[in-house]
Image: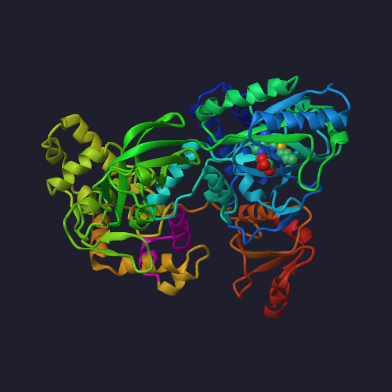
């Protein structure tokens, strides 16, 4: 019986891995997302009922529940070098001439690839299982980011056995953030008052360096493999065939890789991408040109920092000139006034640009932008249009500097500049402009996710005075809504149903939705997990808030102040009275077994488990993995080179066990 279940679990895993391969590697899914989710749910259910069969390489085990304490170092067996750059055809030809000279003939071919603008990653597979993922670091030593990389669905946790797999296979490639994910992430961050990432590369790098891999998992990163590092036996004698083998092993390879027989073909391919690249869905900052045959790469060798067998070709940043027709000042949900330039529409990197944020009045003054100015715009990371320069010599006569408003453009109340900040804010808590933005955010997808409650309806609800705060949404009656202009009976019903459905959103979403300054989705998740209930969070002392990992003093103060404000308390009371039940989902734990309910601290390196795996094993045993030793600790599990935690355990007289004993206890 148990054997049957185990077999069934393995069959489901194989099936899911097969669909991952079709989706991520071949780009040819055979089933719908829904069918996929069903298979996944089936596997998860079976595993939950039979936790003894859960293994680290199961598709369900990508995300670790426990935050890391920090990143350890990984020394690269083969250094991760950088690349020399070229910027035009002449420089590419000069590179080709150097190659011809060194190889002593023209008998060689190239592979031309997109230069993905992300973060270089090394993936170490041992016997086909992903054991370590590391960043490039300084080329010699990088950071161990295994827990975070495991959450990237395009990265296989096990290689597919379609081919013989070398015992040691280090795969190198690029982790990147697709443009759509980047835009979405920055939108959420802006709404939460968190600084935006400048470009998808920074966003990808930042996401890999998070201590909590559940947050990384939500970042929608992806991956392309493009090289090998350390390897017990070569996969092929040239690069192109190596990439083909990668594919058969289940590793995603960029579909736009081309072979070129000489430098003229290389140049044609490079030029052909200067426009096409804008339609890719992810950013590339150039092309990479590589000698195909490994034997010839050997002859060419490397200088200290870069190989002589490859070179990059970089695209110039695209810019456009246009005119600032007017400058609007927008009010955000926390009262921030943002100047936005309305531009004469202009084409830039494939889209028409009509508006550009000037961010704040300090930035506006630094640029010296005036209405009527001719400005140079550029897309930051080719996505968000930015004003980078004012052509002062083209300024028409009679223009005046744009002054920051003395009053809120929306409600006419007083404004003030943040102490030691750049933002100017409307100080009126009752400002209708702010209320609209707060409600839009509250109802937004990452927060309470209230379908059908869009901008137009929010405008109507606030302007008629029907909604003055979040709680008023839950008091709305269908008949009242149906009385609004352009609102049919059926749509009114849909709105009411959607509002009703939002009552059971999890705690972290509710905390995010409140729009507490400096608290976005990520920090809300940390708070929800720490406190477990809204009540505990509302009554938390400032010191406790500040002592939480990743909650800085500014956030702690902001949360504390928010819940001390009687107006906020009243609205929350009304929300609860209306039936909102924001709750922290409870992790399901094994109820029986020798370790159930125990608290275990791990120190040192273990033979059979990575840090993530051991924490998972502890959780599956129904126990809790904790990071520091205290009187509440039941066991300390000590591996090789244990740290000060072992001393502490001895000091407190806590039982110390080794890996073997642990394995016996979980049997
Ligand atoms: S091959 C010796 N192929 O570009 C370097 N790198 O500027 C061998 N990159 O650190 C790397 N796309 O992060 C290679 N198709 C591609 C690439 C690529 C992006 C990055 C990589 C590297 C950087 C060098």
Q: Position of residue 91 (x, y in %)?
A: 69, 33
Q: How many numbered marks are there?
A: 0
Q: Position of residue 51 (x, y in %)?
A: 63, 46
Q: Which residues are magenta?
A: 522-540
Say which quarter of the image contains residue 266. Answer: top right
- 24 left or right of 542? right
> Does 396 appear in magenta?
no
Say which quarter of the image contains residue 624. Answer: bottom right
- 241 left or right of 630? right
Q: Quadrant of the N terminus?
A: top right
Please report the residue visible at 45 percent of the width from the left and 69 percent of the height from the top. 553
> What colour scheme was applied to this rendering of the protein?
rainbow
Q: Is residue 550 visible?
A: yes
Question: Along the line of sight, which residue is nearer the eye, 400 or 527?
Answer: 400
Relative to 86, is 401 above or below? below
Please report the residue visible at 16 percent of the width from the left and 57 percent of the height from the top. 412
Question: Along the line of sight, which residue is nearer the eye, 117 or 552?
Answer: 117
- 633 left or right of 172? left
Relative to 472, is 601 above or below? below
Please report the residue visible at 36 percent of the width from the left and 64 percent of the height from the top. 535
Question: Along the line of sight, which residue is nearer the eye, 25 or 19?
Answer: 25
Q: Is residue 295 visible?
A: no
Principal secondary structure, stretch drawn in magenta = helix
Q: Position of residue 265 (x, y in %)?
A: 69, 20
> Does 530 appear in magenta?
yes
Relative to 477, is 67 above or below? below
Please report the residue visible at 24 percent of the width from the left and 38 percent of the height from the top. 495
- Image region (quadrant) for ligand 1: top right
Q: Position of residue 183 (x, y in %)?
A: 44, 41
């Amino acid at each position: 019986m148990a054997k049957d279940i185990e077999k069934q679990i393995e069959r489901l895993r194989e099936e899911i891995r097969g669909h991952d391969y079709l989706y991520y590697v071949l780009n040819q899914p055979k089933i719908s997302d829904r069918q996929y989710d069903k298979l996944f749910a089936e596997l998860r259910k079976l595993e939950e009922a039979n936790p003894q069969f859960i293994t680290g390489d199961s598709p369900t085990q990508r995300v670790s529940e426990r935050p890391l304490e920090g990143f350890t170092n990984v020394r690269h067996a083969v250094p991760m070098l950088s690349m020399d750059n070229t910027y035009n055809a002449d420089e590419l030809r000069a590179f080709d001439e150097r190659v011809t000279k060194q190889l002593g003939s023209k008998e060689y071919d190239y592979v031309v690839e997109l230069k993905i603008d992300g973060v270089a990653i090394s993936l170490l597979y041992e016997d086909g299982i992903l054991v370590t993922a590391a960043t490039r670091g300084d080329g010699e030593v990088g950071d161990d980011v295994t827990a975070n990389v495991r959450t990237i669905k395009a990265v296989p946790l096990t290689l597919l056995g379609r081919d013989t797999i070398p015992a040691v296979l280090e795969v190198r490639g690029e982790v990147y953030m697709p443009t759509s994910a980047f835009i979405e992430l920055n939108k959420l961050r802006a709404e939460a008052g968190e600084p935006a990432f400048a470009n998808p590369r920074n966003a990808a790098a930042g996401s890999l360096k998070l201590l909590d891999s559940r947050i990384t998992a939500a970042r929608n990163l992806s991956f392309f493999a493009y090289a090998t590092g350390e390897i017990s036996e070569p996969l092929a004698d040239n690069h192109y065939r190596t990439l083909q083998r990668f594919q058969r092993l289940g590793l995603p390879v960029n579909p736009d890789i081309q072979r070129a027989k000489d430098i003229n073909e290389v140049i044609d391919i490079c030029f052909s991408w200067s426009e096409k690249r804008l339609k890719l869905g992810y950013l590339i900052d150039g092309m990479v040109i590589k000698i195909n045959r490994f034997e010839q790469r050997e002859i060419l060798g490397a200088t200290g920092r870069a190989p002589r067998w490859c070179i990059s070709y970089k695209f110039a940043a695209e810019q456009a000139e246009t005119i600032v027709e007017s400058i609007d000042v927008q009010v955000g949900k926390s009262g921030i006034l943002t100047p936005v330039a309305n531009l004469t529409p202009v084409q830039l990197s494939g889209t028409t640009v009509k508006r550009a944020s000037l961010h704040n009045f300090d930035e506006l003054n630094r640029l010296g932008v005036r209405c009527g100015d001719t400005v140079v715009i550029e897309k930051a990371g080719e996505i968000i249009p930015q004003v980078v320069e004012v052509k002062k010599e083209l300024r028409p006569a009679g223009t005046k500097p744009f002054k920051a408003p003395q009053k809120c453009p929306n409600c006419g109340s007083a404004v003030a500049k943040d102490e030691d900040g750049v933002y100017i804010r409307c100080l009126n808590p009752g400002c209708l402009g702010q209320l609209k933005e707060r409600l839009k955010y509250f109802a937004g997808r990452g927060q309470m996710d209230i379908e059908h409650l869009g901008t137009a309806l929010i405008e109507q609800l606030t302007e008629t005075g029907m909604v003055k705060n979040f709680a008023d949404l839950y008091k709305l009656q269908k008949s009242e809504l149906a009385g609004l202009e352009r609102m049919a009976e059926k749509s009114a019903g849909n709105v009411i149903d959607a509002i009703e459905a939002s009552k059971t959103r999890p705690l972290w979403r509710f905390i995010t939705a409140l729009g507490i300054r400096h608290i976005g989705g990520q920090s809300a998740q940390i708070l929800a997990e720490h406190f477990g209930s809204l009540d505990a969070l509302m009554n938390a002392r400032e010191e406790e808030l500040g002592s939480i990992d990743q909650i800085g003093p500014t956030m702690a103060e902001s949360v504390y102040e928010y819940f001390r404000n009687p107006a906020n308390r009243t609205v929350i009371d009304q929300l609860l009275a209306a039936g909102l039940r924001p709750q922290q989902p409870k992790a399901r734990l094994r109820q029986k077994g020798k370790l159930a309910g125990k608290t275990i601290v791990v120190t040192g390196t273990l033979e059979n488990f990575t840090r993530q795996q051991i924490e998972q094993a502890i959780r599956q045993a129904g126990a809790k993995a904790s990071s520091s030793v205290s009187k509440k600790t039941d066991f300390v599990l000590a591996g090789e080179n244990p740290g000060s935690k072992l001393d502490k355990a001895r000091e407190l007289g806590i039982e110390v066990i080794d890996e073997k004993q642990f394995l016996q206890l979980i049997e």
